[in-house]
């Protein structure tokens, strides 16, 4: 099968396996998702979801967060790891939102990646989940599983994003990435893929090899 055919088969198979896939971070506003995603770096989504309710209640909008003391923000997010860097980023991010974007979260990649601490992965998540735009969220699960499928041989996240944009139907790409997260946690784990249990083993290049050995 060609890469395009593998990609389309993967989209269909994961849709059947995980029909209700969505972001596992809890949020109600674009800013809350932006903050939660920044906190999720090297931290589980479950832990972030425990921390954010109090943080969001204390700082409900960009203006309040922009005027916050970094030390106070840090006190809310200590259990997330890297909290000193993250707290500085969150305050600086909010200040830029207020100064340059009227306190609103931008709806495009170019502006989002200007924000302190925000890379393409988070920017794509915001564009896809909040604004309904075609997005490819290249996290560790996406990198690992799409490489095992044989869709690319890249290690650079931006190159992987570009490669997948050429292969995935734009209207499916965002949900596809959410489903990769669920599949990566349940079946195609980092330690060892459980190919016999995988819904994609009939066309995944790694799965075919594993099943035939």
Image (cartoon, rainbow, N blue to C red):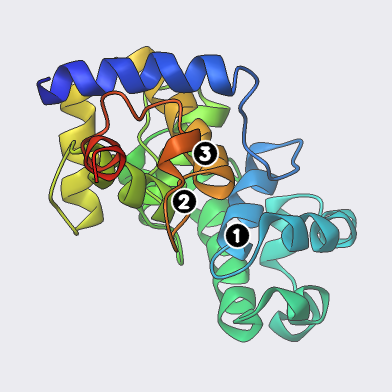
- Which residue is identified by label 2? 100
- Against 116, residue 84 (above or below) is below
User: Which mark lies nearer to you, 2 or 1?
Assistant: 1
Label 1, residues with CA under 10 Å away: few <14, some 14-19, many ≥20: many
Mark 2 or 1 closer to N-term?
1
Residue 183 bears which disc, if any? 3
- Verify CB contact (< 8 Å) between mark 1 and mark 3: no
Residue 8 or residue 46, whichever sits in front:
8
The number of callouts visible is: 3
Q: Residue sitting at 16 percent across and 19 percent down?
A: 4
Local SS, label 3: helix
Residue 158 or residue 101, whichever sits in front:
158
Q: Residue sitting at 26 percent across and 37 percent down?
A: 149
Q: Position of residue 88 (x, y in %)?
A: 59, 78
- Verify CB contact (< 8 Å) between mark 2 and mark 1: no
Label 2, residues with CA under 10 Å away: few <14, some 14-19, many ≥20: few
Label 3, residues with CA under 10 Å away: few <14, some 14-19, many ≥20: many
Local SS, label 1: helix
Q: Residue sitting at 42 percent across and 58 percent down?
A: 192
User: Which mark lies nearer to you, 3 or 2?
Assistant: 3
Q: Position of residue 19 (x, y in %)?
A: 60, 17
- Against 167, residue 189 (above or below) is below
Mark 3 or 2 closer to N-term?
2
Q: Give residue 119's quadrant in the image.
A: bottom left
Q: Give residue 140's quadrant in the image.
A: bottom left
Q: Residue sitting at 37 percent across and 24 percent down?
A: 173
Mark 1 or 3 closer to N-term?
1
Instruction: Judge from the rendering whether residue 65 lies leftward or rightward of residue 37; answer left or right.
Output: right
**Residue 126 visible, this orientation:** no
Mark 2–mark 1 Cα distance, whole angstroms, equals 10 Å
Q: Position of residue 73 (x, y in %)?
A: 75, 75
- Which residue is identified by label 1? 94
């Amino acid at each position: 099968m060609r890469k395009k055919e593998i990609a389309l088969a993967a989209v269909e198979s994961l849709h059947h396996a995980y029909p209700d896939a969505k972001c596992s971070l809890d949020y109600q506003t674009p800013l809350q998702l932006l903050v939660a995603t920044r906190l999720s770096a090297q931290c589980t989504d479950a832990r972030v979801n425990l921390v954010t309710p109090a943080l969001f209640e204390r700082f409900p909008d960009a203006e309040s967060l922009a005027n916050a003391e970094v030390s106070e923000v840090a006190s809310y997010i200590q259990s997330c790891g890297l909290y000193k860097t993250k707290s500085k980023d969150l305050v600086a991010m909010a200040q830029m939102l207020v100064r340059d974007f009227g306190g609103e979260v931008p709806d495009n990649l170019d502006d989002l990646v200007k924000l302190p601490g925000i890379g393409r992965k988070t920017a794509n998540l915001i564009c896809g989940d909040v604004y309904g735009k075609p997005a490819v969220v290249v996290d560790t699960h996406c990198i690992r599983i799409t490489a095992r499928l044989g869709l690319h041989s890249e290690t650079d996240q931006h190159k992987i994003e570009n490669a997948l944009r050429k292969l995935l139907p734009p209207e499916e790409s965002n949900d596809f990435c959410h489903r990769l997260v669920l599949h990566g946690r349940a079946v195609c784990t980092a330690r060892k893929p459980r190919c016999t249990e995988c819904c994609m083993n009939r066309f995944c290049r790694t799965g075919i090899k594993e099943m035939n050995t």
